[in-house]
Image: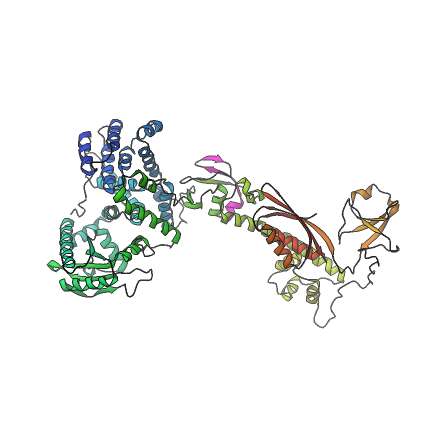
Amino acid sequence: MNEIVRPRCYEATDRESARQALARVLPVAENDLPWRALDYAYERLGGSEAFAHSVGSALIAAELKVGADAVAAALLHACLGDEAEMDERFNSAAQLARGVAAMARIESLAATTTDKRIDPHAQLEALRQMVLAMVEDIRVVLLKLAERTHALRCAASPAPEGDDPDERAALREALGQQARELFAPLANRLGVWQIKWEMEDWAFRYLEPETYRTIAAQLDEKRADREAYILGIIERLKAELALHGIEAEVTGRPKHIASIVNKMRRKHLSFEQLYDIRAVRVLVRQEIDCYTVLGLVHNLWQPIPGEFDDYISQPKSNDYRSLHTAVIGPEDRALEVQIRTFDMHRHAELGVAAHWRYKESGKQDAQYEEKIAWLRRILEWKDDVADSSEFREQFKTELFHDQVYVLTPQGRVVALDRGATPVDFAYAVHTDLGHRCRGAKVNGAMVPLNTVLDNSQRVEIVTAKEGTPSRDWLNPALGYLATHRARSKVRAWFRQRDVGEQVNLGRSLLDKELKRLGVGDVNHEKLAQRLKFSSVDEFFAALGRGDVGQRDLVGALQEPGKAPPALAPTAKPRSRPGSGSPVVIPGLGDVPLTMARCCKPRPPEAIVAYTTVGRGVTVHRADCASLRRANQARQMPAEWALDLGTGFEVDIRLKAFDRQGLLRDVSDVIAKDKLDVLRVNTETRGEYAQMQLTVRIKELQQLSRLLARLQHVQNVVEVRRS
């Protein structure tokens, strides 16, 4: 039984027959571009099957009403040669033809993926999105749909004598799988219904021939008879609505076999339980008219009990609104009638209740669905102005150009932001792959790591056995990273490494504090628990950042029933000199002191005093290089005063990628630590901002904490004490 009665495969291979066939479907006012393309294709392909296939594809493209250049492109796509000659002779049609040929690269990707860890549904969805992202002109997708539809038709023809029947069967199965998984869903979401329905039926016929024949036998009429039946229903309804003065649009369609089976499986129904094998839709202006039409339908034909749904008063969760009823129509055949306003219909087709998403289900993506809705609006408008060169520019869409789709060596499709590089790709596949990335191959050729990727490229990452990311990757001027996800992972790695340094610093600080307090070995785990930390490393990191104060530490060191350790050494601290000098020199009275400019000593660094000739006493860092050449006899021991309550000044140098709000974020960090900022100097050099800050602190832990927190400010590259 041949249920599909669509036009068969176009098989004529002579030029005159092709010209006559095209003349029947092209508008009289059409330009001569298709005819020139037809002659060119015949010159290149001769009377071959490829020529007949090109003509068949062009006939379907002409039915889609997407312009003369698109029809010409369908004729040219199989005979691309000299690009310069093609562009000179056919201009935009040549560009469209190249787009159709380029799409052939992704036809087999769904079948060639070898990575078994990939979710097949996610892979197919990525492939569909990649198709739309690849094209500069959305008509390329329509032409590809036309070409694949004609290929499906031709596969139904008997195999030529001498051909292997198994090979023919394998071809049909491959075409059916490709149509079901890739091209029919694309036609569905673009609203190209006739191609979508035909592709689904061909795919079902090739992939499930037994089930197809069973359902076809249960349909007690051929498709042509069902179409004639629907036309009679439409005429009857139009006459009844006109009689009652109701302005309406009535359309109908017999349900396709693939749609019938899909609904039976989706809702677990038998064939006898389906009442929408034949269906009509009535669109009216006002909501009140919906209920008026419903009454007229029920007066014309007997309603089927339990088959009425009012989705206007009680909309579906996706805000779908319509009246659905099933009746016993003429010849005692079940008939479904849907009634809604034009606004409700527009929302159902283009809004959140969009039919394509309902049919395909899957993950919701509001931004992507909005782009699809815009494309469908463009395709709806084309019927009126398809020959306008101004309107054809609307087909050249960049809606999907914010993303790029590339392939792993195993064929997995990876979606990335436009401008992404191999390093972005590596982090998208796996964090560890990104960390160990050292090189990349694109389509088999080595490329720099800051190469911008393009659609459908196959990317392979060259790795080290053990590797770490580079700080250069965070420099936007070098172009290694374009995606927020990859940048976040690199920053997280460096933050984690900084935590390790904080742990080491915290462990060192604890050892020094225990020695200062005269406390022996302590249980680090118990100490961390007393201070409410879940692990010893977390405690050490907090201590290294300065988040744990001396009093908190001393309190945690106290054993039950024992006196707490002293907060300071038992030796009496030296008093601060009356001059307010921050330095004490044993055995020396109140004399003027000068801080050496050569080494700029700052508490709590080890210091020594040096007696100069005529300039008093100068204080140097103990490791100052100048002292090595000085007279050792003039050096004296010196210490910082222990009761320094006013704090001391520290210069901090900060380097960051310049951005708006950087100074504000740095100031916020300092303010949270309740520190005084004495001076700030900012200078911009190219991509970088250099900051010199002077703050007043009272203890070294404050400085450690401040430096650690400034390091985590967004875009900061380096922070150090100067």
Relative side of 187 to 685, left or right: left
Residue drawn where x is 43% and y is 36% of the image: 443
**Front residue of 625 and 139:** 139
Which quadrant of the view contains residue 241?
bottom left
552 falls in the magenta region: no
Compared to residue 148, the image places residue 88 above or below, namely above
Task: Say which of 448 and 384 sits in front.
Answer: 384
In the image, is residue 618 above or below residue 287? above
Percent position of residue 263, x then y: 25, 56
Q: Is residue 438 left or right of residue 522?
A: left
Q: How is the image coloured?
A: rainbow
Q: Position of residue 87 (x, y in %)?
A: 34, 30
Residue 642 drawn at (x, y percent): 79, 59
Report the magenta residues as a range.
429-457
Magenta stretch: includes residue 430 = yes
Going by the picture, which residue comes out furthest to the left?
A: 331
Query: Vertical placement of 509 versus 191: above or below?
Result: below
Left of 37 or right of it: where is 515? right
Q: How many marks?
A: 0
Question: 249 and 503: which one is in front?
Answer: 249
Q: Is residue 323 visible?
A: yes
Percent coordinates x, y for residue 500 in the rendering: 62, 52
Most extreme residue toward the bottom, as rendered?
561
> Is 42 left, or right, of 682 in this rendering?
left
Which residue is at the front of the view, 156 or 378? Answer: 378
Which residue occupies 25% across, 44% down?
384
- Residue 14 visible in the picture: no
